[in-house]
Amino acid sequence: MNQRLERLRQLLAEKKLDAIFVSQAENRRYLSEFTGSAGFLLVTPKDAILATDFRYTKQAEQQSPCFDIFRTDGAISQWFAELVSLFDIKRIGFESADISFATYRDITSNPSGRELIPTEGVIESLRAVKDEEELKHIIEAIKIADDAFGQAAASLQPGMTEIEAAWQIESMMRDMGSEPLPFDIIVASGPNAALPHHRPTDRPIAAGEPVVIDMGARVEGYASDLSRTITLGKEDDKFGKIYDLVLGAQLTAIATIEAGMSGETSDGLARTVIEQGGYAESFGHGLGHGIGLATHESPRLGQNSPDVLADGMVFTIEPGVYISGWGGVRIEDVVILEQGRARPLTGSNKIR
């Protein structure tokens, strides 16, 4: 925690801020390890304060020994001014992507000569590069998803509904030690597989059709993300063609992504393969996203993404092709950038 706070303080100095007011939940947990559902942080060059109400003060003391605890009573318009008055700070950054207009109005109602400065992505930029402890938790979450997928792929049968399959997978991951899942499992069969964010229905899965499964586990707050596309029974020629195209795009990206590339350039490595295969219009989402305390975080690998990849970043590589009326194929692995190259962390089989 001390190292994370010091890195944040370096950024505050670069941005000429006297403090930052942290409201975003994952950022709060990243800096303090506090897991309560209500609270704020105030970080200055010398001090670190966790502000929370009476429900969580004891929990905050136990989880966040590097922070002084400030008990919040009443509306934020009342206690925020009291909190910042304890420190000689004038320029205070706040997380403009998270603070609502109503909260902004409340915290600026009693400015006392202090200036509230909107910031974006300050702590998220720190979270993008994972430390050893974070990587350990992500790898544990990946292993749970890998093991559950292996069991599910062997046990799913034609006639089982998408909802039944999704519940079976979720039960497996929870039995294996996953915390509440980071996102709802996707099981999309047949034409539903053409919908990247399909929600499972009571549609029975038929033999030979594409089935997209998107799943993830969570360990100590850190998520994994895994997508595979399978068929139950003999596949048709179209499935084989689309599958091999998507797999080729993914393997190309894994082999050629390098540190220093932008998210847009990285996306283009896989997108070019799919375009050359004649399915340019069928790959409508980005190539990948960072993963950690949030399922989707920095960096973003996609068209128009300026994010620059660096060693220590953990992200997904998940090209897909989606064809209305038929279905789709998505293959997704989590990788870490090490010594400038992508190393896959996912271990699930993806060879047909």
Image (tube, rainbow, N blue to C red):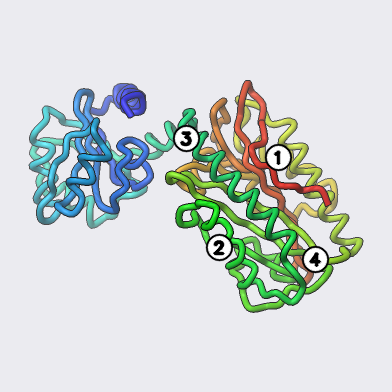
Identify the residue shown where x is 52% and y is 34%: 135
Upstream in sequence: badge 2 or badge 4: 2
Residue 246 vs 117, above or below: the answer is below
Along the line of sight, the residue nearer the viewer: 249 or 338:
338
- Which amino acid lies under the numbered mark 3 shown in the image of this protein? Glu
In the rendered image, which residue does mark 2 sit on? 171
- Which amino acid lies under the numbered mark 4 shown in the image of this protein? Leu
Whole-angstrom CA distance, mark 4 to mark 1, is 32 Å
| Contact (Cβ within 8 Å) of mark 1 with mark 3 | no
Upstream in sequence: badge 3 or badge 4: 3
Whole-angstrom CA distance, mark 3 to mark 4, is 36 Å
In the rendered image, which residue does mark 1 sit on? 268
How far across and how far down the image is residue 230, in percent?
Answer: 77, 59
Spot the residue most to the front.
175
How far across and how far down the image is residue 119, in percent?
Answer: 33, 38
Under tag 4, what secondary structure?
loop
Identify the residue shown where x is 50% and y is 52%: 178
Whole-angstrom CA distance, mark 1 to mark 3, is 29 Å
In the rendered image, which residue does mark 3 sit on? 134
Quarter of the image where the N terminus is located: top left
- Which amino acid lies under the numbered mark 2 shown in the image of this protein? Ser
Marks 4, 1: nearer the viewer: 4
Whole-angstrom CA distance, mark 2 to mark 3, is 25 Å
In the rendered image, which residue does mark 4 sit on? 232
Q: Is residue 297 left or right of residue 64?
A: right
Whole-angstrom CA distance, mark 2 to mark 1, is 37 Å
Residue 308 vs 211, above or below: the answer is above
Residue 143, quarter of picture? top right
Under tag 2, what secondary structure?
helix
